[in-house]
Amino acid sequence: QVQLVESGGGLVQPGGSLRLSCKVSGTIFGITMGWYRQAPGKQRELVATIASGSRTNYADSVKGRFTISRDNAKGTVWLQMNSLKPEDTAVYYCRTEPPSSSVIYWGQGTQVTVSS
């Protein structure tokens, strides 16, 4: 059973930064990884993805502010979030992406709150 554990969330003021981590219990070689978020009362949405070869994709709302990265050997994916806005407040989740992963695994999520 593959497990994903997110960490790094918290309370930050607008304009601040946070770095989220997603540690995967199994290998992530060849697996595209994604970060998602879900704000209260809203649907879960894609934030960013990173392929095994490090090709990245971002939602328009975070382009230029967020950076996704990975270390295959460590089985870890990060999301560096800069210039945070109140609308970035959400629970952030990582997951394995199909079709590179035949099974979609989700982490338990980490809360990010942007407020003064």
Image (cartoon, rainbow, N blue to C red):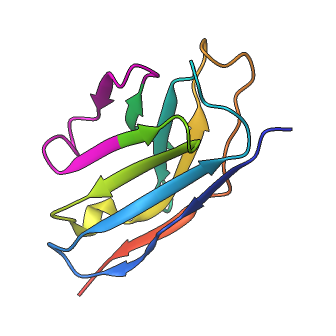
**Depth check, front residue: 87 or 97:** 97
Residue 98: where, in percent of width, then height?
60, 17
Identify which residue is drawn at 17% across, 51% down.
65
**Depth check, front residue: 53 or 116:** 53
- Highlighted magenta segment, given as a residue range: 51-68
Residue 56: where, in percent of width, then height?
31, 27
Question: In the displayed structure, would residue 99 be above or below residue 82?
Answer: above
Identify which residue is drawn at 57% across, 25% down.
97
Say how many tags the image has.
0
Q: Is residue 107 left or right of residue 6?
A: right
Q: Is residue 62 left or right of residue 79?
A: left
Chief secondary structure of the magenta portion: loop
**Furthest-right residue in this view:** 1
Q: Is residue 37 left or right of residue 57?
A: right
Residue 92: where, in percent of width, then height?
49, 56
Does residue 43 appear anywhere in the picture? no
**Furthest-front residue in this view:** 73
Question: In the displayed structure, would residue 30 be above or below residue 49?
Answer: above
Residue 82: where, in percent of width, then height?
20, 61
Question: In the displayed structure, would residue 89 be above or below residue 55?
Answer: below
Quarter holding the N terminus is top right
Question: In the displayed structure, would residue 32 be above or below residue 88?
Answer: above
Magenta residue check for 48: no
Quarter holding the C terminus is bottom left
